[in-house]
Image: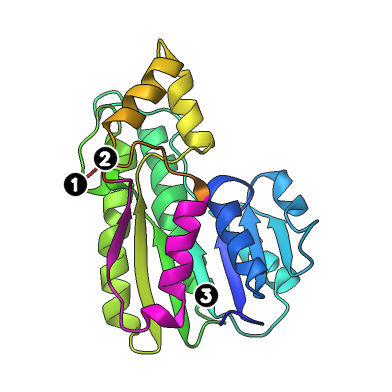
Amino acid sequence: MMQDKQVIVTGAASGIGLATATRFAKAGAHVLGLDRKPGVTSIGLDLPNMRGVCCDLTDVRQVTTALEEGLVKTSVDILVNNAGINPSPSSLTGTSEAVWQKLLDTNLTAIFRVTKIVMGYLYEGSIINISSILAFSGANNNAAYAATKGAIVSLTRAMARDHGPSIRVNCVSPGAVETEMFEEYLSRCDDPVRERERIRKALPSKRLGQPEDIAEAVFFLASDAASWITGQMLVVDGGDSA
């Protein structure tokens, strides 16, 4: 199904991005992982068909160079826009313009930039954008992050209209997944252990998500099994939004 497909995954150094890149590589795809973290260059040590290139996704020149260096085919079949940050969560009034702009650049505008470049290689196939349940579910002190994730859902639907039928565009909205970002959130809590348990017990599934849970959802949307699905948001949150 994925044998010899060319896949690009952003934010591939860790968490959901790494799990997604690994899922496609194990299925036989050629995977190029992009991330600003230097550790991305080590992601393909165990899988020869997976390679990581370090680049700033907000810099068009760096992204263009990374694709020229990292792609093994002249065409791309699947793009997963996963990269995102939330370095200093706050309310709207507590968010500086600099932080607001940084989140917009990394979480939203980078999708615009990367996708425009990749479209030069992607003639038919699938694009999956990673949003969040905060796109539609309120949370304290996450105004800028929630705004960028909500915009991703709207962008996904617009792209699906513009680029069908040759390119399908969908998004996945994860809930509480055990990633570096989730651990950073816990580290800001007075009692991280208690907060982790509070979140876990509140979920109908009674367990926190793992990066692999999201990777499987992305893999499904990119596969032929989802050939009649486009412009949709798949929520993967253990029932948090039920």
First reached walking from the N terminus: tag 3 or tag 1:
3
Q: Nearer the viewer, residue 157 or 220?
A: 220
Q: Identify whether 13 is placed above or below 165.
A: above
Residue 21 at x, y percent in the picture: 61, 61
> In the shown orientation, is residue 195 left or right of residue 158?
right
**In front of the other: label 3 or label 1?**
1
Give residue 76's quadrant in the image. Answer: bottom right
Q: Identify whether 65 is placed above or below 198.
A: below
Residue at 51% x, 70% y: name it.
Answer: 79
Residue 177 at x, y percent in the picture: 44, 41
Q: Nearer the viewer, residue 100 or 162?
A: 162
- Look at the image and give the residue range highlighted in magenta: 212-238
- Residue bearing the label numbered 1: 242
Residue 100 at x, y percent in the picture: 36, 38
- Residue bearing the label numbered 2: 204
Residue at 69% x, 83% y: name it.
Answer: 73
